[in-house]
Image (cartoon, rainbow, N blue to C red):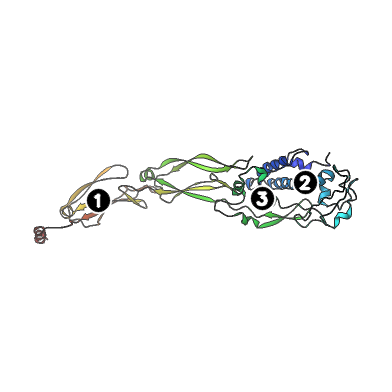
Amino acid sequence: MVKETGLYDSLLIKPDSSDAEIKKAYRKAALKHHPDKNKDDPKAGEKFKEVSQAYEILSDPEKRKVYDSYGLDFLLKGGAAEPPPGAGGMGGGAAGGMPFEMPGGFGGMPGGGGARTFHFSTGGGGGGGAGGFNFSNPESIFESFFKQGGAGMGDDDDIFSQFGQGAGGGSRAGRTQSSKFRDSNGSAMRQRAPTPEVTTVEKPLPVTLEDLYKGTTKKMKIKRKTFDEGTGKRRVEEKVLTMDLRAGLKEGSKIKFKGVGDQEEGGSQDLHFVVTQKPHSTFTREGDDLRTLITLDLKEALTGWKKTVTTIDGRQIGVERAGPTQPDSEINYPELGMPKTKGGRGDMIVQVKVKFPSNLTIQQKNGLREIL
C-alpha cells in the first residue's frame, strides 16, 4: 500500500507499474503535452512539467520507495519535517543535506529489517530548503530520457529533429539559453528559452508564359514529415496544394501556404512557391511587354519585306516594311503584351535582325558598289 498516488495518477498508471510501463507512460505523456506542440494551450507547459517531475521520481528506485512510503512532501523536504510513525528516526537528521543513511531500512518499508542503507542526492535543481529535493528542469528530463534510449523504442534522433532543432539545421546546443520559473515549493528552476520562429521553405514553381498570360489553377502534391504522437517516430504524409495564378503574374511572385510543411520545433514550416517562367520559343518577357524577333536577309532589309507574327493569344498579324530596314530596329504593337495588374495590356515589340552574307563574289561586290 502506497501513501499517495498523485505521481502515478499524473502518468495514468497504477502504483504497481513496472519500470518499462513508467517509461512508456512518460514518453506518451511528454510528447502529448510538450509546449512546442501546444502553443495555443497555456496549460500544456504545466502538464508537461507535472509528468516530467512524476517520471523523475518514479524512475529512480530509491526515490520511488521513499515516495511510496512517506509521500511527496516528505521527499521534497528531505526528511526535515516530522516523519510519519515508523520512519526509523529519520526526523531532523536528514536536514543537514543529502546523501544520508537510514540503517535498518525505512521502518515498516517492505524489505526493511537487515542493515540496509539507501543513498540518493537531493541537490536537484538548486535553491530548495536545507537538504530538500528539487526537481530538475522538465526539458532536461525530457532530453535525457530520449538520449538514453527513450524506453528502448528507437528512432530517438527523430524526436530531437522535432523538439531540438529546426529545418535550418540549428543544433540542440541552442536550447541552453533559459529563464527561471518556480516549482511547487517556490524554488527557482530553469526553463528553456522561447521557441524559435517557424522556418519558411521556398520552392520554385515553373509556369509557362501562356499560363501566366491567361491565368491558371495548379495542383501540386507535396510530401511532408510529421511525427506520430504515440511513438514519436517520423512519418511521411502526402498533401495536395491548390494554387490559383492570376493572369499577368510576374516571375518571382510568391504563392504562400502557412503551416503545411515539415513539422519542427515551434510548429509546421511555411511553404512559399516562387513563380519561375519556363523558356518560350518565341517571346521574352520584359515586365508587361513581350519581345519577339524576326530575321531578314540583306536583300529583304534593303528592298522591303513582309512577315507574319503570332501573338501570345494565338492571333496571326502581318508585319511589313518597304525598306530599307535598319538592323535592330523595333516595331511596337500596343495592347498585345501581358495583362497588367490595373487593367490593360503591355506592348508586343517586334525586333528586326538583319543577316549579312558570309561572303560575296567579285562581281557581287562590284555590283553593290555601283548601286550604293
Q: Judge by depth and name the residue closer to the eye, 300 or 19.
A: 19
Q: Position of residue 229 (x, y in %)?
A: 63, 41
| Distance between mark 2 and mark 1 Cα atoms | 87 Å
Q: Quadrant of the N terminus?
A: top right
For label 2, count other residues whose C-alpha is less than 10 Å away and answer few (under 14), some (14-19) or many (20+): few
Q: Position of residue 30 (x, y in %)?
A: 68, 44
- Give the residue drawn at x 67%, y 41%: 28
Task: Say which amino acid is labelled 3.
Answer: Glu
- Residue at the far front: name it: 114
Q: Amino acid at mark 1?
A: Ile
Q: CA distance from mark 1 to mark 3?
A: 68 Å
**Which quadrant of the figure contains the C terminus?**
bottom left
According to the image, label 1 marks what residue? 294
Q: Secondary structure at mark 2?
A: helix
264 sits to left or right of 3: left
Residue annotated with mark 2: 61
- Using residue 332 as the reference point, say whether residue 222 is left or right of it: right
Instruction: Give the structural element (helix, strand or loop) at label 1.
Output: strand
Tell me which numbered mark, 2 or 1, is placed earlier along the sequence.
2
Q: Kindly state the secondary structure of the residue where label 3 is placed.
A: helix
Q: Residue 143 bears which disc, if any? A: 3
What amino acid is labelled 2 in the image?
Pro
